[in-house]
Image (cartoon, rainbow, N blue to C red):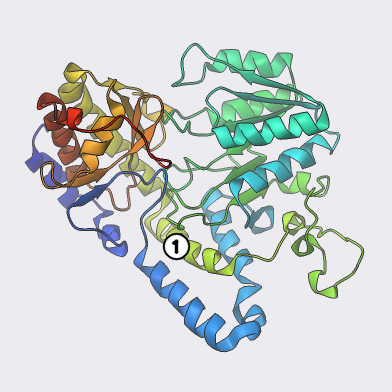
């Protein structure tokens, strides 16, 4: 197991190996940042090129009827299949932040839940900003549950908080720092029992782990499409609302695409009776076009197969880290239990940022390795099963060994760029 030949053998036996050919790859580069931005599907180049040249260039305004009006719904229906939803329960467009604002605001004003906002200290900062802004504008109490550490939720403490302070909670299914995965169904059931609802952020989970919203009794979720879904930088987000809730929620951003008849140009807002009521401005057609190639590949490969490979590769990577890197001053921040992690593995080191710089330097051992850094000392490695190879993980560990044992990392600055 502990040699490169073994990794190559695992790759040769991988039933998903052919999907790697569906992506653009740079030579001499190992890309392990799919939990921030997924690679470019080759089919996305074709789709966007066609949308630019044929649809926008030649057909112009006629493309709204011929191609564009139905595109958001068609792609949303594919996400519905991915998440085990009805197609009328999910909408694509806007950003995750906008979607979170819309649905949190709507839930606060539907009078079905206590007017209290809650989250925990593992939550993604942007989500915290949204919640804090709403709480301030609405003059509401908001609680942020702090744990004794920053790598995993203390579930019993979280459950007690929901019980003591019922209301609307927002949690990330997979923690952005450590890769910790929350017990989705258990917490949904607990929230329901205690007059509460959890809005889940699936951004670091969708496309890497299998999510069945119906089986887990998930009622509301948001998420991005540019990480494991390979939708492209800044690609549109999705919003899921269970159909039994939709009619009771009012979109606080009343744009014309949320109107029942947007092209009637009525001066009176008449909200759509479906999830489309959460529409706002004109859909971002070019971004949506790029998204479709990624979700098509995920559906073709199958989420159960993708998650199975993710778990196997994470197990392999963690075993290498335990054997080779822990003696060199690294720590593992990701849970060891398969069911408690997503598809990125986080490690820490007191010199994490200079180590990241050395990893990205192709002059060091002839290969450029792109991880992801999160302050103060986390190095994240996103495993994207459609294109990550076992040998990539082996080579990454070997370069980390060299960087530390040779003190190569001392040649790099501690100063961080705007986008680390």
Q: Give the residue displayed 54% in from the left and 43% down from the top.
A: 212
The picture places residue 82, in percent across and down from the top left corner, at: 51, 52
- Left or right: 315 in relation to 194: left
Q: Image quadrant of residue 336?
A: top left
The picture places residue 368, in percent across and down from the top left corner, at: 20, 47
The picture places residue 319, in percent across and down from the top left corner, at: 22, 27
- Left or right: 191 in relation to 107: left
Instruction: Name the residue tied to disc 1.
Output: 296
Q: Give the residue displayed 56% in from the left and 63% down from the top.
A: 75
Q: Is residue 297 above or below residue 353?
A: below
The picture places residue 374, in percent across and down from the top left corner, at: 40, 32
Q: Nearer the viewer, residue 274 or 137?
A: 137
Query: Where, quadrant-wise, is the C terminus in this rendering?
Result: top left
Element assignment for label 1: helix
In the orientation shown, which residue stands out farthest toward the right? 268
- Left or right: 84 in relation to 371: right
In the orientation shown, which residue stands out farthest toward the bottom? 58
Q: Is residue 23 above or below residue 168?
A: below
Q: Is residue 216 visible?
A: no
Q: Image quadrant of residue 121?
A: top right
Q: Is residue 54 visible?
A: yes
- Bin the neighbour count of mark 1 within 10 Å (Cα to Cα): few under 14, some 14-19, many 20 and up: some
């Amino acid at each position: 197991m502990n040699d490169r030949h073994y990794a190559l053998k695992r790759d040769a036996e991988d039933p998903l190996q052919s999907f790697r050919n569906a992506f653009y790859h740079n030579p001499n580069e190992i890309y392990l940042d799919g939990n921030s931005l997924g690679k470019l599907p080759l089919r996305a180049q074709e789709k966007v090129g066609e949308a630019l040249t044929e649809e926008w260039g030649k057909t112009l305004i006629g493309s709204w009827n011929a191609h564009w009006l139905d595109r958001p719904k068609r792609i949303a229906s594919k996400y519905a299949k991915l998440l085990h939803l009805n197609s009328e329960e999910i909408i694509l467009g806007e950003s995750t932040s906008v979607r979170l604002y819309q649905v949190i605001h709507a839930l606060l004003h539907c009078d079905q839940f206590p007017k209290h906002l809650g989250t925990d200290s593992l939550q993604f900062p942007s989500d915290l900003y949204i919640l804090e802004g709403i709480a301030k504008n609405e003059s509401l109490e908001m609680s942020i549950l702090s744990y004794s550490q920053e790598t995993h939720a203390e579930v019993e403490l979280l459950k007690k908080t929901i019980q003591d302070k019922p209301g609307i909670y927002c949690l990330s299914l997979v923690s952005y720092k450590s890769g910790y995965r929350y017990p989705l169904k258990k917490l949904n059931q607990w929230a329901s029992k205690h007059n509460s609802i959890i809005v889940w952020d699936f951004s670091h989970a969708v496309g890497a782990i299998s999510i069945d919203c119906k089986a887990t009794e998930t009622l509301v979720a948001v998420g991005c499409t540019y990480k494991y879904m390979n939708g492209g930088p800044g690609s549109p987000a999705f919003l899921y609302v269970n159909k039994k809730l939709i009619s009771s929620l009012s979109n606080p951003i009343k744009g014309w695409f949320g109107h029942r008849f947007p092209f009637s140009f009525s001066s009176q807002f008449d909200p759509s009776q479906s999830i489309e009521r959460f529409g706002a401005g004109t859909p971002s057609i070019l971004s949506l076009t790029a998204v479709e190639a990624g979700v098509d590949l995920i559906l073709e490969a199958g989420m159960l197969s993708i998650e199975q490979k993710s778990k196997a590769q994470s197990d392999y990577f963690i075993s290498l880290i335990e054997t080779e890197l822990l003696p060199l001053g690294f720590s593992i921040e990701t849970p060891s239990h398969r069911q408690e992690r997503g598809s990125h593995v986080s490690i820490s080191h007191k010199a994490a940022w200079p180590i990241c710089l050395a990893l990205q330097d192709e002059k060091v051992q002839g290969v450029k390795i792109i991880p992801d850094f999160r302050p103060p000392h986390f190095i994240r490695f996103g495993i994207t099963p459609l294109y990550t190879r076992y040998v990539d993980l082996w080579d990454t560990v070997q370069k980390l060994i060299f960087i530390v044992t040779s003190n190569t990392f001392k040649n790099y600055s501690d100063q961080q760029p705007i986008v680390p």
